[in-house]
Amino acid sequence: MPELPEVETVRKGLQELIIGKKIKSVSSDWPKSFPNDQSQVNLYIINSSIIDVRRRAKLLIIDLSSGYSLVTHLKMTGQLVFRSNKQNFGAGHPSNSLVGKLPDKSTRVIISFSDSSKLFFNDQRKFGWMKLTEKKDILKHFTSIYGPEPLDSSFTTTAFKNRLLTRPRSVIKAVLLDQRVIAGVGNIYSDESLWAARIHPLTPTYQLTDQKIKLLHKSLIDVLQLAIKEGGSSDRNYVNAKGQKGSYIKIAKVFRREGQSCPRCNHEIKKMRVIGRGTHYCPYCQRLKIGKIES
């Protein structure tokens, strides 16, 4: 599933392509992918124009001139593919649908614009969705459950500490993955940030000193910003808005590097499972202080 850097990369790419386009028609072949009443589609999507493409956590929000938005979650295998006479761009799971003839068997939604260009929402496993929502209701229905955005200017070290301490006896890896605590951070960038801050993934939050929290805060922001610059990680199944795989995974320090040497101390990188997620760390750089922990 995409993390914050991957979704942000897609947002930036789509914003260049579809802002200002007027929607002529919408069709869908799978109700769970497009769970919207046809009367509302006719009123609030058809003949409206796209005025912005935003991101909240791992959600894409396509704002319409009607005062409504298409809130989109790509989940595991979702794609957004834009096609016109001059441009062909893909974003999401790197199947042949990114470059092949569309619609195909994975196409769930087709948004046709007045200039004959189209935006395809493809999803092989049918877990993703596009939900029409009035802008004023987005917070209530979708985004209120998420913690703060880690790249927002208000996300200070103090704010970070306060969020971590909402789960003081949980292991830090679990806390970083909890979208209610911090928005958008997933498996890859939690591992990378913890390595950069020299914190063992099983360290209980209450054991972190102010100095360690400050370092983890900086490390998390640095890692996310670098990942966005590199176009995300393309975690085997993700590409950016131009159909290009992100390059962050090539420079990752520990993620999917088990058995290799730690770039900091040359000890062997290990892999374990934390709350069911594969977790990569250096047992020498990231030493664990023994204590009672909860997941």
Image (spheres, rainbow, N blue to C red):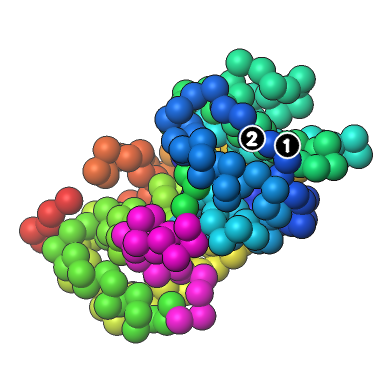
The numbered dot on residue 284 is none
Q: Is residue 153 magenta?
A: yes
Q: Nearer the viewer, residue 18 or 10?
A: 18
- Which segment did they paint magenta? 134-154
Residue drawn at (8%, 58%), measured in percent from left and top? 292
Counting residues from the start of the chain, the first of labels 1 and 2 encountered is: 2
Residue at numbered disc 2: 26
- Asked which quadrant contains residue 145, the reply is bottom left
Residue 26 image position (x, y, % from top left): 64, 35
Residue 186 image position (x, y, % from top left): 42, 50
The numbered dot on residue 112 is 1
The answer to whether residue 47 is above or below residue 175 is above
Outermost residue toward the top in this view: 105
Q: Is residue 196 magenta?
A: no
Element assignment for label 2: strand
Residue contact at pointers 1 and 2, CB within 8 angstroms: yes
Residue drawn at (42%, 73%), measured in percent from left and top? 217
Q: Is 174 on the left-hand or right-hand side of 69?
A: left
Q: Amino acid at mark 2?
A: Val
Q: Nearer the viewer, residue 102 or 291?
A: 102
How far apart marks 1 and 2 lie (CA) works out to 6 Å
- Asked which quadrant contains residue 210, the reply is bottom left
The answer to whether residue 216 is above or below residue 276 is below
Q: Is 164 on the left-hand or right-hand side of 294?
A: right
The answer to whether residue 163 is above or below residue 130 is below
Is residue 223 something one can see in this rendering?
yes
